[in-house]
Amino acid sequence: MKNFDDLILKAKKGGKKRVVVVGAEDIEAIKAVSEAEQEGFAEPILVGNKEKIEENLKIIEKNYQIIEADSVEDAAGKGVRLVSSSTADVLMKGNIKTSTLLKAVLNKEWGLRTGNVLSHCAVIETEHLQKLIMVTDGGMIINPTLKEKISIIDNSVSLAHSIGIDIPKVALIAAVEVVNPDMQATMDAAILTQMNKRHQIKNCIIDGPLGIDNALDMMAAKIKKVDGDVAGKADILVVPDIHSGNFLGKSAIYFAGGKIAGLILGAKAPIIVVSRANDSKSKLASLALGVLNA
């Protein structure tokens, strides 16, 4: 899959999924889900203050189902219940704090818990690479443990499968390509690589530690004499901490002119969290990801 156009086309072919926007007073969120509806892969359900939502719908001249909520907490609860009861398929953050939404997601009685770790996976489009690259986790887990990295990999591999990558190549990113006992990221990478070889982590090919250059560029890999099935051909970049993932994703936009979409994974349904700074194409791509992963 080369770009967001390919991603959106795949979502259109899969048919409509019901997308719940929690805190739908946010007109930008309504515009995004409306565009997905026009493209043929989303059926919006809007949860929040009915009067404000109706004002926004008048602006874009649309008429969607509205579910009244008395507060942001009430909106989060009602939105999550729609998904957990299978009335809807995908959860999308609108005008609500992520922490408030996730508190409802993790509710033990009616939430979307699976026992798995929640992690964020960004999908990046850049003209130079000519394919979509996934980066995880730059949005949820601050400094993941080895055990959490296994879940992060599992979540991102599941997403890769949903967009048509049968056996994704997973690069475990570090500052160096050799194992250094003083650098925990390289130690974790070596263990995870071996776990993959022993079939403890399945449905993907893992290698690391790898530098960002030799994970993505064949020439860089050859120059540094880094070989293997992943070097220069990575589909998924697993970063050592939230800072490096966040920097990597945003640098693709502001240094390379790329675009970024993403999801929170690991719940019973995908959770779309878009930034106000994202352009309309990136928001539409995030919705396509959510629909495909539902």
Image (cartoon, rainbow, N blue to C red):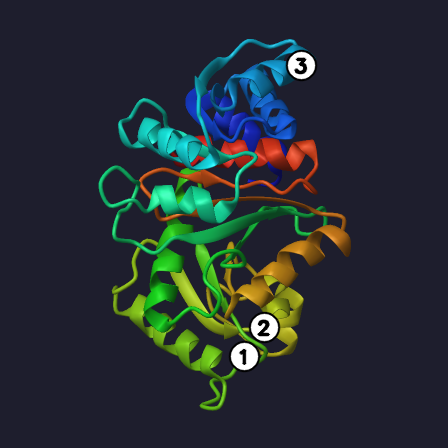
- Is 114 positioned to the left or the right of 181 in the image? left
Indicate which disc residue 177 carries: 1
Residue at 77% x, 56% y is 255
- Is 290 positioned to the left or the right of 35 in the image? left
Name the residue beneath numbered marker 2.
211
Residue at 31% x, 30% y is 81
Kindly indicate the quadrant of the structure image that contains residue 27. top right
Of the two numbered discs 3 and 2 in the rendering, the one whose residue sits closer to the viewer: 3
Percent coordinates x, y for residue 96 in the rendering? 53, 39
Secondary structure of the residue carrying tag 2 is loop
Mark 3 and mark 1: Cα distance apart in space? 51 Å
What's the residue type where badge 1 is placed?
Glu
Percent coordinates x, y for residue 69 in the rendering? 44, 25
Mark 3 and mark 2: Cα distance apart in space? 46 Å
Dot 1 crowding, Cα within 10 Å, few <14, some 14–19, many 20+: many
What's the residue type where badge 2 is placed?
Gly
Mark 2 and mark 1: Cα distance apart in space? 6 Å
Percent coordinates x, y for residue 183 in the rendering? 50, 85
Label located before the other in sequence (2 or 1): 1
Q: Quadrant of the N terminus?
A: top right
Of the two numbered discs 3 and 1 in the rendering, the one whose residue sits closer to the viewer: 3
Dot 3 crowding, Cα within 10 Å, few <14, some 14–19, many 20+: few
Label located before the other in sequence (3 or 2): 3
Residue at 42% x, 37% y is 73
Indicate which disc residue 60 carries: 3
Q: Nearer the viewer, residue 101 or 186?
A: 101
Asked if marks 3 and 2 touch (Cβ < 8 Å), the reply is no
Q: Nearer the viewer, residue 125 or 264?
A: 264
Kindly indicate the quadrant of the structure image that contains residue 79. top left
Secondary structure of the residue carrying tag 1 is loop
What's the residue type where badge 3 is placed?
Ile
Dot 2 crowding, Cα within 10 Å, few <14, some 14–19, many 20+: many
